[in-house]
Image (cartoon, rainbow, N blue to C red):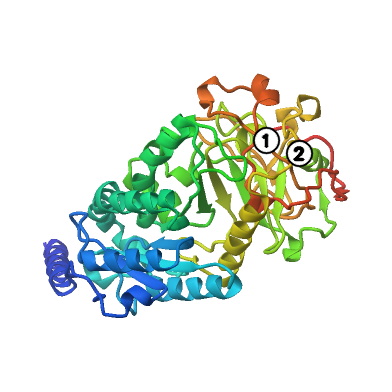
Amino acid sequence: MKIIKHLLLIKIVLVVVLVLSLWSTRIPDQPFHAVTATTAQQNFHVIEFNDKGQMHDDKQWQALSQRLAQQPGAELLIFIHGWHHNAAPTDENFVAFSSFYQQMAARDPQRNLIGLYIGWRGDSYDPFWLDGSDDPYSMVEPLDFPTIYGRKATARRIGKTGLSDLLDQLDAKTTAGQLQRYVLIGHSLGGAMALHASKDRLKQSLEQGKVNPNLYILLNPAVTAKEYKPLDEWLSVDRQKPAMVVLQSKGDFAVKEAFNLLKDGERAMGNSWAITHDMDQCSGNDCSRVVDIPLALQKHDAIPGCMMTLNGTGWKVRARLQARRTVQSCADANMQAVWVLAVSDEIIYGHNGILTEQHAMALSEVMALIDRNQNQLPLHAVSGEAAEVPAAEVPSTDSPDQPTTEVTPDREPQGTDDADTETLQTEPEVMASPVQNSHASSAHNANRGSAVDPSLTESTLNTTPTNDKPSSDGGDIKR
């Protein structure tokens, strides 16, 4: 009886502490930034939304609109924060994006670059005062994960209403020539918001065969593979870049593990069959370094389009084969309208290791390459059937030294992931019109173009085999 009484007392204490924490940590739904007489002349802006999806203050948009009208042709860098964050000047994400924007602007002084921070109430309260969102190494944050239910519904609502309306107005300014393009970056629940704000407009442009000049980047998005549909059915119409890029850290416990548990086993978008590529850091950040890799990886990388590099930051991207039934070749992977990349921890550490100086360098290089190669890339097929390596020979690795096989439970084996390879660049083709994946097979490769992201290519593209030495355990590795 004493044990039962003690357990009952403990439960009562926990309930009291929980109620106290909910009462004391209630976060009001309010804006943090007032518009002043000089806001319209500034290069860094904030627009905040309430939980209903409405702007807290329409003057924030009016100030940004006036700034865009002052110097037509500006480029807008937008960031949407996620769970636990808001637009407070001291918020970790606000401070990080302010620095990220400044680094981008300093790196590209020739651009008329304007920063825009999208704020919303990323948390309504913190039960038990648990909030590790400011620490990328935190083991505390997952403990209050159930609060994500209400915030995710709010993020989706804002994405489909207020943020979508904002993008409509920005698209109109792009059409009118006041805005050259915008780059929309969403993290975690901010990624969910960005997806739901952009999905319909991307689908419409793909259906119409129109090139969308903007770039959508989702960082560790808290969305399921089901939410991502039907974008998986479409191929890119722009050989310069995919319409959307999803970057999912392989070490992100919050999205890859806890999120899956709360969704009753439904897998997160970046941890599912949706993956099209793997991104890893080259050895010593030098993609030209000669390293020992299995012979099967050499064969895979020698196929144009199967391995690409971003040399400024020393990152490499490998097409992941057979994660989907419609992705059987590297050309298939590169032609996807949305690239979903599984990213190593060296590039994005865990769930919150974002907006670093290295990330600013990479995005700057991406934007420069897009401009340099816009509609001027050489026409060379990335899909030569004679050059294809049988799928069974292409390994998948989860460590720099030892290739292994990574298989999703409900799909075919997935493609490659290695940390040490040589540079290989690719040349994409022109694609005349959008084609749904359901109608695309390897038999159509010769007729399709490749949406090779110029962030992963150089203006002078090298398609010669790598100089990597075969490892002692080389030879064909079966899946």
Which quadrant of the structure image shows residue 348? bottom right
Mark 2: which amino acid? Answer: Pro
Residue 356 in the figure: left or right of residue 50: right
Residue beneath the point at 62% across and 45% down = 240
Residue type at mark 1: give it.
Cys
The x, y position of residue 367, in whole percent, is: 59, 58
Query: Is residue 242 visible in this depiction of the protein?
Result: yes
Element type where label 2 sits in the image: loop
Label 1, residues with CA under 10 Å away: few <14, some 14-19, many ≥20: many
* Labels 2 and 1: the sequence-earlier one: 2
94 with respect to 307 (left or right): left
Could you say where residue 114 lies in the image, as x and y percent from the top left? 45, 68
Question: Could you tell me which residue is drawn at 33 percent across and 67 percent down?
Answer: 66
* 338 to 173, vertically: above or below: above
Give the quarter of the figure containing the N terminus: bottom left
Q: Which residue is mark 1?
A: 330
State the mark number for residue 25. Answer: none
Residue that appears at 67% across and 50% down: 373
Q: Viewer-proximal residue, 206 or 18?
A: 206
Marks 2 and 1, how far apart at CA: 8 Å
Question: Which label belongs to residue 304?
Answer: 2
Q: Nearer the viewer, residue 121 or 439?
A: 439
Q: Residue at x 60, y 35 (%)?
A: 335
**Mark 1 falls on what kind of element?**
helix
Circles 2 and 1, Cβ within 8 Å, touching? The answer is: yes
Residue 125 on image: x %, y %: 21, 67
